[in-house]
Image: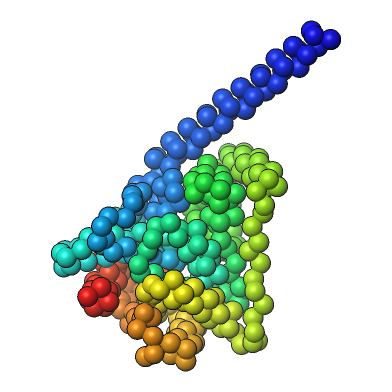
Amino acid sequence: MKKKSNTILLASVTIALSVLVTSIVVIGGDVYLHKRYEQVAGLNVWGYRGPPIGAKQAGERRIVVLGGSTAFGYGVPPDQAFPAYLERALNDQHHEQPISIVNLAYNNEGAHSFRYTLDDYAYLDYDIVVLYTGYNDLDPDFNREVYRHQSPVFRLTGYLPIFPIIFQEKAMILRHGGDLEGAYQGEKTVFRPGIVDRTTAAALETAVRISRSLQRQLDGLVGAVETSAIPTLYPEHWDYYTERIYEAVVHVLSLEKQIIVVTQPYLSELHITQQRAIAHMLAEHWLGSDPRLHYINLGQVGNLKDPLFAYDGMHLTAQGNKKIADNLVQPILAILE
């Protein structure tokens, strides 16, 4: 009986050590991937773009930017995304207090994600929220993507595992001929990968499925997140989008913080119609009556067909991002002062 107990104990210790060693290797590899991709098109260990930000300093004013790939700065390094340009410009002109800007944007996320992101990053103790919004909510199928919040590890610890994201995006790139944004938007694949690319993509996708399987098991322990949409109150085309913006604004104002809703450079007639709906909703509820809410229309700032401004008709070049930042400096300085 004693021999059997020792055997069970030894087996338990062996399994525990195996799990511990495997976890250390996986975590170490994940941190390495974060560092490797952070300055290219990746995220830091806390799930946002740019260097991790520390505790808020005395007198510091902190701004967070939410949006999709155009706020994220898809196609340019982190320091050439418009939030980075905006932070440098504000600090050059506002010497009384240090100003930090955290880029919380994420590829393909729309207005549905904003409440989750604001809650997940409440610990940043932000003073001003900037919603740079529109493009990812043009599709008649409601955008319900909330990538980071779907990770149980992220919800538990604030740490975002990048291993499944890197592998998934590599597979998407291989299957879409290098067009990652098109893959995220679900556009039909026109590129026909060769057998090597197909095999590599399949292997990467298998690794992602294994990783997600582990995350689902963890979800069983911590509780899966519910990201289903709140039913729209009215059947109008833009009501789902405007209601998600409305919820975000109500949330920020309830925290006694400032919020700025920004219209992106006009993409199409459909986008113009969408943004008119947002401007109408904001004017109907708050504009002119609540000084903490601000609306800035950058629809006419820059021509998306100009390759010096936007390299693909949507995502901005470094020059384009700087132009967006330059047009936000004075309005934000007025808010700060």
Tell me what residue is drawn at x 39 percent, y 69 percent: 129
Residue furthest out toward the right: 1
Q: Which corner quadrant of the image does residue 309 belong to? A: bottom left
Q: Could you tell me which quadrant the C terminus lies in?
A: bottom left
Tell me what residue is drawn at x 47 percent, y 84 percent: 278
Question: In this image, 36 relative to 111: left or right?
Answer: left
Question: In this image, 219 relative to 250: left or right?
Answer: right
Residue 295, above or below 8: below
Question: In this image, 29 relative to 15: left or right?
Answer: left
Tell me what residue is drawn at x 66 percent, y 19 percent: 13
Q: Is residue 327 visible?
A: no
Tell me what residue is drawn at x 22 percent, y 66 percent: 90
Q: Which colour scheme appears in the figure?
A: rainbow
| Along the viewing direction, whichever of 190 and 9 lies nearer the viewer | 9
Residue 120, position as x, y percentages in the image:
50, 58
Q: Is residue 27 visible?
A: yes
| Along the viewing direction, whichever of 287 and 272 lies nearer the viewer | 287
| Along the viewing direction, whichever of 223 and 240 lies nearer the viewer | 223
Q: Which corner quadrant of the image does residue 197 belong to? A: top right
Residue 326, position as x, y percentages in the image:
24, 71
Residue 160, position as x, y percentages in the image:
50, 47
| Along the viewing direction, whichever of 69 and 333 lies nearer the viewer | 333
Q: How many marks?
A: 0
Q: Could you tell me which quadrant the N terminus lies in?
A: top right
Residue 282, position as x, y percentages in the image:
45, 86
